[in-house]
Amino acid sequence: MDRRATGRFRGPLAGLLVALVAAGGCFVGGVSDPQGGEPAPPEPTVAPGTAATRADGTTSVEEFAQDVADAQAVAERYWAAQFRASGEGFRPIRRIVSYQRAGEVSCGGQALPRNNAVYCSQGDFIAYDVAWSVAAFRQVGDAFVFYLLGHEYAHGIQVRLGIRYDFTIQQELQADCMAGAYLGDSVRSGALTLGEGDLEEFREGLAAVGDDPDQPWFAEGSHGTAEQRTDSFFRGYERSLAACDLG
């Protein structure tokens, strides 16, 4: 029986952790240096084996794994419906994998570092550091998982649509918009339930991140200012994919 995922976004987003996950390691096809561009995300302050947690009740690795599975299921159904509406067949991202050590997973011959999450087109997979991701999940709540999967899945959709911009910032801001559309449309359809205050928490989280003011917009690895990222995400959230310049 097909089980409908109904993940509920809980608790403050603790902005920096959520958006840095989506921003810190989004390279496609192994062509960008995963150590370059933005600073590495901060080390988690809660290890996966500890009992410390937020008041929203997100604690266990099992809960985290279930939210990853739910987020993947919602994303696959969402994008399958979009492709079907356009008369196109949909091919889901091949796999979502976790890793524990730097170099355990590679993309295009480049070893993935710790504290990272990426989409790799040369293999068509999403990979994430499980210890870091579980720790962030405990500190932030399950909205972290749905945003993370939404943003990285958007990179896979860009590849399927043949979208490749000249500058990283264009690719990343579009992925923010697509993640917003995926979340907004899923909330409106009832596939996800948004808790009171969570929308503003997304806004506060996105506003807390962005490239360093001195980072050139055209630099490899640029993701956009806090204002640009917030605007892109909420354009997608409020207006769906029509706002994301998919052509």
Image (spheres, rainbow, N blue to C red):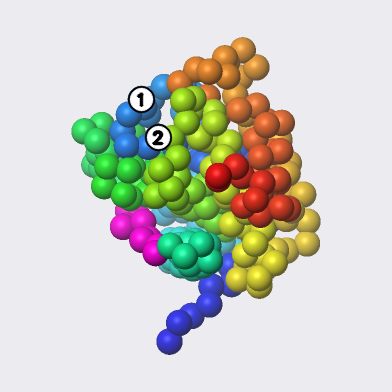
- Please name the predominant secondary structure of the magenta segment in the image: loop
> Residue 209: x, y in percent?
64, 32
Which residue is disc 2 drawn over? Answer: 27
Q: Residue under label 1, please give it.
A: 33
**Which sits in the foreground, 134 or 34?**
34
Check the picture and name the quadrant holding the C terminus. Answer: top right
Span shown in magenta:
89-98
Q: Hey, which residue is sitting farthest left in the picture?
A: 109
Q: Residues within 10 Å of mark 2 (few under 14, many from 20)?
A: many
Is residue 115 in view from this perspective?
A: no
What residue type is disc 1 on?
Asp
Q: Quadrant of residue 224?
A: top right
Question: Could you say whether the residue bearing mark 2 is in a helix, strand or loop?
Answer: loop
The question of residue 96 being in magenta is answered with yes
Residue 50 screen position, x and y as percent:
46, 53
Q: Who comes first in sequence, dot 2 or dot 1?
A: 2
Q: How crowded is mark 1: few (under 14 residues within 10 Å), some or many (20 or more)?
A: some
- Out of 81 and 200, give the one closest to the viewer: 81
What residue is shown at x 67% (from left), y 58% (from top)?
Answer: 184
Vertical placement of 193 versus 94: above or below? below
Q: Can residue 168 be seen in this view?
A: yes
What percent of the width, then of the height, locates residue 144? 56, 51
Which residue is found at the position 41% from the left and 54% from the top?
Answer: 49
Quick check: 195 left or right of 114? Answer: right
